[in-house]
Image (cartoon, grey):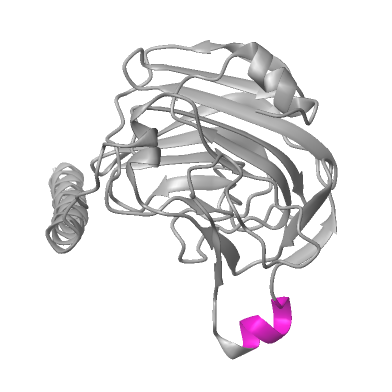
Amino acid sequence: MRWLVASCAGLTLGLLAALAGWRSTRRQFDDYRNDNAPAVTPREGPCATSGLVAHWTLDSAEITDLRDRSGLGNDLTAAGSFVPWATLRFGGPKPVEGRVGGAVSLALHQWFVGPNNACFASNVVSVAAWIWLEDPARVPTLIAKSNWPSDGWWLMTTSLDPLGSDRLLQLGISSGNSVHHVDAGYQLPLREWHHIAVSIDNAAHEVRFFVDGEAHGPVHRNVPTWLVNWSHPIVLGDYDGTGRWPWHGRLDDVRVYNRVIADAEVKAAFGGRAP
């Protein structure tokens, strides 16, 4: 009898703790949304049409030319941790030999920030890039338009393991404070160039992955609806521009589309040809 009473008490305490944790998370989410109302950005202009909305070649011999070659002016700016020891330890982004011309090498606490505008506020997004993973620590993220626990997506997160050791190619999406991961079924090798692409279609609830110019795995269907993030800029080399999940490796020839990318376009990007 005492055992039964103790078990019921333990179960009750566990449920109360879980409820308190949920309420704490919910409060954090509500506070975030209250303090970060969706940005009002124009839908008119070139980004109202479907196509390539950003092309960052990252070819400059010095990391000063982060222009968008799509013609839409979605240039990047370098960012990172300004903690003195971090700057001394990791330095800044470095130019390296790339897969298509030059490339950029990022260590921890470094990333690039793009604009927050209608070009990247689309229910359909595709990304293609040459990537080189130097170190999987801290769950490296290639590109994202999200910030916990708000809405959005983060593409090419390569792990669910907090230490990043599994190196799984994945897409993360957020709808409110609910998170979902779509696994490509591909383990990214270390210290090798590979071309990665993904398309996410919110209307069709579909996700497709490509590796080295070819479709990888089946079309992922019945993907939960993700909410477009209007409050946060697009970030290259990190999840949300806080340095929590930074990319540690090289990036080259990154392209973003506001529509589903065609197989022929993936092959063209893989071959280094013009968009």
Q: Residue at 64%, 88% (x, y): give it.
A: 85
Compare residues 228 and 271 and report the one nearer the observer: 271
Compare residues 153 and 184 and report the one nearer the observer: 153
Confirm whether residue 134 shows in the render: no
Specify whether residue 88 is painted magenta: yes
Compare residues 212 and 5 and report the one nearer the observer: 212
**Overall secondary structure of the magenta section:** helix
Coordinates of residue 209 in the picture (x, y in percent): 60, 22
Would you identify the image quadrant in which residue 24 lies? bottom left
Q: Residue at 30%, 44% (x, y): give it.
A: 229
| Residue positioned most to the bottom | 84
Coordinates of residue 20 in the picture (x, y in percent): 15, 56
Query: Is the residue 64 above or below the residue 58 in the image?
Result: below
Give the residues drawn in magenta, as a range: 85-91
Question: Which quadrant is home to the C terminus?
Answer: top right
Query: Is the residue 230 above or below the residue 219 in the image?
Result: below
